[in-house]
Image (cartoon, rainbow, N blue to C red):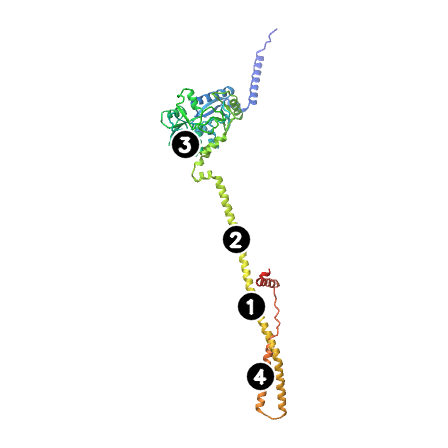
Amino acid sequence: MALQTFTPNEKMITRLTRHLFFLALISLCSFLLPSDIVHAQDKTIKIGYAHGLELFQENETLKQTLSALQSRIKNVEFALISLSPINTLSEIKEQKIDFLIGPSNFFVEFRGSIPFTHLATRINANGKEPAKTVGSVFIAKRERTDLNSIRDLEGKSIAASMPNSLGGWLAALREIHNAGKNPDSFFSSINFTQFQTPDVVSSVLNGNVDAGVLTTCVLENIEAMGMIEKGSLKVINEHPFNKTGLACKRSTSDLYPDMSFAALSGVPEWLSREVTVTLLSMPEFSGFRWSIEHDQFSIDQLMKDLGLGPYSYLKDTSLKGLYNRFKQEFLIALAFLLFLIVNELHLRRLVRQRTQALSKALEEKERANEEAALARRRFAALEKNGIISQLGTILAHESKQPLGTLSNYLTILQIYLNKNKETDSLRDEVLKTMGDQLERLNGLVNSVRNFAKKRQNPLVKTNLIEVAQKALRNYEASEPSTL
């Protein structure tokens, strides 16, 4: 078979075509791949972790997790960043952390300060309730026979690792709270160390403190590793094993979730998905594994009972703290107070209206009484005048006839005496006087009769409605029993 030969120009054209093909293929791949993946190759993904675990547990967890992530997600470079357990929040912002590994109570404490998404929780692979594996253990020297219960620890000195350690301090404080004691004033002195082992354990064994606090299973682990003699330390207020199946001694009745792995704000969705899948696919390491099990409610109740994190206002005695603590009661009291004020204003308005109506009714009644009294006086006067008129009429009527008779007899006597044609001055004077007096008496009788006669009153313009209302008021005032 003859070999095909190319001229120099043909070779150049072929090489140029091959290069153009590869460039087009690279451009197409870059277009099809998510931009986040392309840019992620040039960026180191920072995984922050807060100290708080025992060194051997911390190293094993971080080592196994980082190895699994690096081997599965090839196009991303992961880096572990150590964070202070005290200034964790500020260091997260300064270091621009992408993912965070820390105790579960950290995330309740940070809630509202930084946005995050919970991806996985480290659980005990052998427990029946894997989401509840963290509690506290009160330890003391075996010789301390006076320390057996929570109440025996009151007024004693104690050692603990960190003030915000879930198993190494907070769970123990809540157990004291559940026993009806005040955790803030329960111990005479508190010695915080950096680590539970060897710091807390050595403080107890050396007699520097009366007791110490360890996370559940730490005591069993250090005894198995030969760090201390088995039985040299005893557990105070030991609880029996229950349905959780946690094969470790504990002094707290409640258990809480272990470490959590969370994605912070700004992490691409595809990377969070890949990290989650990697964590859930990891095999067991040192008796632990990553799971989606997470009981944030128990952590939230612990923080609330102790007045920590978002519930720190419960220990604030200022006006703002009291308002935040008793906000619901304050709003109810305010609503009740507003109701009382509105009700009082409403009652006052009704009383004012009723008072005005009553005053008006009393004024009308007083006016009606005055009108009725005036009417009674007028009626009495009319009645009196009627009686007088009637008596005058009777007297005038009865006196008219005798006076007429006397007048007739006097006239007859004058006629009779005038027939004798004798003049007698005394007689004439007597007769004249009798006539004058009789005429005067007759005039008096006529005057009485004229007084008793009814006279026509002058016609005046009158409002009949007022007359009717006046008559009704007079009737109501004089005859109230008939209404």
Residue denoted by label 3: 151
Q: Between disc 3 and disc 4, whose residue precedes?
A: 3
Vertical placement of residue 331 versus 7, above or below = below
Q: In the rendered structure, which amino acid carries the disc numbered 2?
A: Val
Q: Residue furthest top?
A: 1
Q: Quadrant of the N terminus?
A: top right
Q: Is residue 55 above or below residue 10?
A: below
Do the CB atoms of the residues marked 4 and 2 lie less than 8 Å apart? Answer: no
Please tell me which of labels 2 and 1 falls first in the chain: 2
Task: Give the number of the disc on residue 377.
Answer: 1
* The one of 465 and 376 positioned closer to us in this rendering: 376
Numbered marks: total: 4
In the visual, does 84 lie left or right of 119? left
Q: CA distance from mark 3 to mark 1?
A: 97 Å
Q: Give the mark, 3 or 1, whose residue is nearer the N terminus.
A: 3
Can you identify the residue that label 4 sits on?
437
Characterize the local packing of mark 2: few (<14), some (14-19) or many (20 or more) Cα atoms within 10 angstroms: few
Occupied quadrant, residue 164: top left
Mark 2 or mark 3, which has the lower sequence index? 3
Residue type pointed to by label 3:
Arg
Instruction: Give the SS element for disc 1.
Output: helix
Structural distance between the alpha carbons of marks 1 and 4:
39 Å
Cα distance between the residues tagged 2 and 1: 38 Å
Residue 426: image x %, image y %? 57, 90
> In 3D space, how far apart are the residues under numbered discs 3 and 4 (Cα atoms)?
134 Å
Residue 307 screen position, x and y as percent? 44, 34
The 10 Å Cα crowd at callout 1, few under 14, some 14 to 19, many 20 or more, is: few
Q: Tell me the kind of residue under disc 1.
A: Arg
